[in-house]
Amino acid sequence: MPGILEYMAKHTISLEIFHKIAKMTNDIAGIYMHESKINMLSNRLRKRLIALNIETFEEYYHYLVNGNDPDEINQMLNVISTNETHFFRSKAHFEALEKKIIPELLSKRDTPVKILSAGCSSGEEPYSIAILLAENNWLSPKLVDLEAVDLNSMIIDHAKKGIYHSKQLRYTDERIVIKYFNLIDHDSYQIKNFIKNSIKFYNMNLLADKFNNNYDIIFCRNVMIYFNRENHINLVNRFYEHMNQDGFLIIGHAESLFFIKNMFQNKVLCQTHVYQKT
Ligand SMILES: C[S@@+](CC[C@H](N)C(=O)[O-])C[C@H]1O[C@@H](n2cnc3c(N)ncnc32)[C@H](O)[C@@H]1O
């Protein structure tokens, strides 16, 4: 049996390989990692080394770049992306959506209001939007069109199944849980089919893949927080190009558009910041 120190030495990522892999994730997906994330990266990547029966991170890096297994890049991004989320995260955004944004857009548009959850993770964000729409009798294809996308193919499969541990529903009213979920065992719930079927889920890289057009509302929360400034600006430009005039961009509380002036007007609705295309 090898000793623990021997095992760790073999399975510790060198700074050189860390930088090479960090550059790949930044170039491909926008996910930026400072050197302080070296342990996080090696812990997350270890699953891939075990799955492929590869002993060292150096061998793994060569496996990634030799091109014989193109799907491994997706598998790597799947283990690296941070997918933390929960239902009705940042409630003020949902209040602004319900009280101000949707009523304003419904009164102006004669086509369905098109909503995108960009970086939707396991689906809690778009399902929260769909529940809010259902609560207001707006969940009809005549009124709204709902899409949700994420880079991580495994998390999109999870979103499509719509099964959640009760922890994900910790900030959700019991009345809503009873109305929109089926209890499937003592602490797992599945979203009801009419909510599930109201959303089109896609596996998509927001920085590289083709966008649909004419969005009226884009939720992109807690995604750009992992990007460097260049990718942040690129993504906001992409959103701008694919949104309707007067459309709304909703970003996370820890995110900002302060260095991108004149494209979006910062508005305070229901005591929260949202951005409207000017
Ligand atoms: C922390 S989660 C945020 C989930 C949800 N928006 C929320 O605020 O609760 C960030 C998500 O962004 C996704 N993501 C990161 N980079 C992406 C990219 N380039 N294209 C699409 N999704 C991306 C990750 O896979 C992850 O699921």
Image: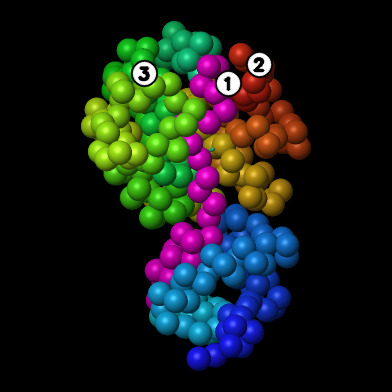
* Chain part drawn in magenta: 69-96
Q: Earlier in the sequence, mark 3 or mark 2?
A: 3
Q: Give the foreground label among 3 and 1.
A: 3
Q: Say if 7 sits above or below 90 in the image.
A: below
Task: Let me know if residue 152 appears in the view.
Answer: yes
Residue type at mark 2: give it. Answer: Gln
Mark 2 touches mark 1? (CB < 8 Å):
yes
Within 8 Å of ligand 1, the CB of disc 2? no
Category of crowding for the residue at label 2, using alpha-carbon neighbours closer than 10 angstroms: few (below 14), some (14–19), many (at least 20) = few
* Callout 1 secondary element: helix
Q: Which residue is mark 2?
A: 271
Q: Residue furthest right?
A: 259
Q: Quadrant of residue 90?
A: top right
Q: Which residue is mark 1?
A: 92
**Residue 174 percent location from the top left of the image:** 39, 22
The residues tagged by marks 3 and 1 sit, at their Cα atoms, a distance apart of 19 Å
* Callout 2 secondary element: loop
Q: Is residue 90 magenta?
A: yes
Q: Between residues 3 and 49, which one lies in front from this camera angle?
A: 3
Residue 177 placement, left or right of 77: left
The residues tagged by marks 2 and 1 sit, at their Cα atoms, a distance apart of 7 Å
Q: Residue furthest bottom?
A: 1
Q: Earlier in the sequence, mark 3 or mark 1?
A: 1
Category of crowding for the residue at label 1, using alpha-carbon neighbours closer than 10 angstroms: few (below 14), some (14–19), many (at least 20) = some
Q: Which residue is mark 3?
A: 175
Q: Say if 79 sits above or below 118 in the image.
A: below
